[in-house]
Amino acid sequence: MSSDAERSAVLRLDGLCLQRGARTVLKDLSGHFAAGSLTAVIGPNGAGKSTLLAALAGEIPPAAGAILRAPGLRLGYLPQLSALDRYFPLQVHEVVALGLWPRLGPWRRQTRSQRGLVQAALHEVGLADLAHQPLQTLSTGQFQRMLFARLILQDAQILLLDEPFAAMDEPSTQELLALLQRWSAQGRTVVTVLHDLAQVREHFSHALLLAGHAVAWGPVAEVLQPAPLQRAGYLPVLPAPVPRGSCSA
Ligand SMILES: Nc1ncnc2c1ncn2[C@@H]1O[C@H](COP(=O)(O)OP(=O)(O)OP(=O)(O)O)[C@@H](O)[C@H]1O
């Protein structure tokens, strides 16, 4: 019989294999993300983290196995920064309002209450004063905050974020980490690719450690141990200490 945690799974991976071109970059991944969990996907460069998120978002089909999503749940995906065009001729509030599309459909004139939602989302990420700035005038960190505001409006139950803090200063990062924790407390399921293990320890409930396959997946305290991190090639294997008195000089 399945455990309570398995019954609350919103995303389940069953023997998942993913390919880029002809190459298998992730293999035999099985497990689940529970409702309200806050999972950091970690691992060395090339481990398959971004590939996994793109597959969870439905952008890369499984080469084998399956991704099963609980029916009726909205999904929000924030790919790595470089994937987005910063020179589109739009103002900040217009980009953020795109977050309403999944619920309202495109090309509708915004109502007063929708404009209020956009403003509230901009306020939540500290960009209320920049609502009417053209997109290309934003700094990289402001641009990323704007994308978080768009995600807030998507009101998704599953949030997939690929290195969301890569371009951000420390105060912005801390504010947005707090936002992830609020999302989790609201029962949303958050899956985030991250490299900063201190952030993972402090702010996340679960971690999935990848190195072309799952090296470890579970509560953060169990995954962030020297042995699995070394197996993933994420911590140097230190030489054994030289016994005292063994130097010849
Ligand atoms: N579009 C692509 N075409 C072919 N191979 C790709 C493509 N994107 C990624 N890869 C390869 O797939 C493997 C996994 O890449 P992926 O971007 O998922 O790793 P990652 O763990 O997110 O790495 P990083 O920490 O460097 O962002 C890498 O070896 C990469 O070279």
Image: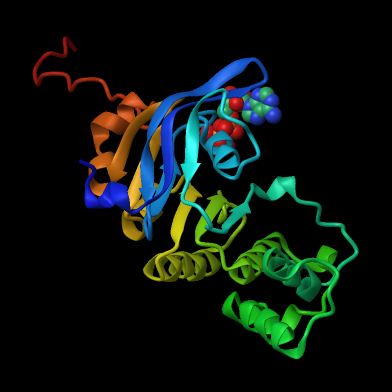
Q: Position of residue 185 (x, y in %)?
A: 37, 69
Q: Is residue 53 above or below residue 241?
A: below
Q: Position of residue 74 (x, y in %)?
A: 57, 59
Observer-nearest of 35 and 148: 35
Q: Residue at x 83, y 72 (%)?
A: 91
> What's the colour scheme?
rainbow
Q: Residue furthest bottom?
A: 112
Q: Is residue 158 above or below residue 21?
A: below
Residue 224 showing in the rendered view: no
Quadrant containing ligand 1 reads top right
Question: Can you say which quadrant of the picture contains the C terminus?
Answer: top left
Question: Can you say which quadrant of the picture contains the N terminus?
Answer: top left
Observer-nearest of 168 and 105: 105
Q: Residue at x 44, y 69 (%)?
A: 178
Observer-nearest of 136 and 116: 116
Q: Position of residue 129 (x, y in %)?
A: 72, 84
State left or right for residue 145 relative to residue 91. left
Q: Position of residue 158 (x, y in %)?
A: 50, 56
Q: Residue furthest right?
A: 89
Residue 153 showing in the rendered view: yes
Q: Is residue 114 above or below residue 211?
A: below
The total number of labels drawn is 0
User: Picture quarter containing residue 106?
Assistant: bottom right
Q: Residue at x 66, y 78 (%)?
A: 122
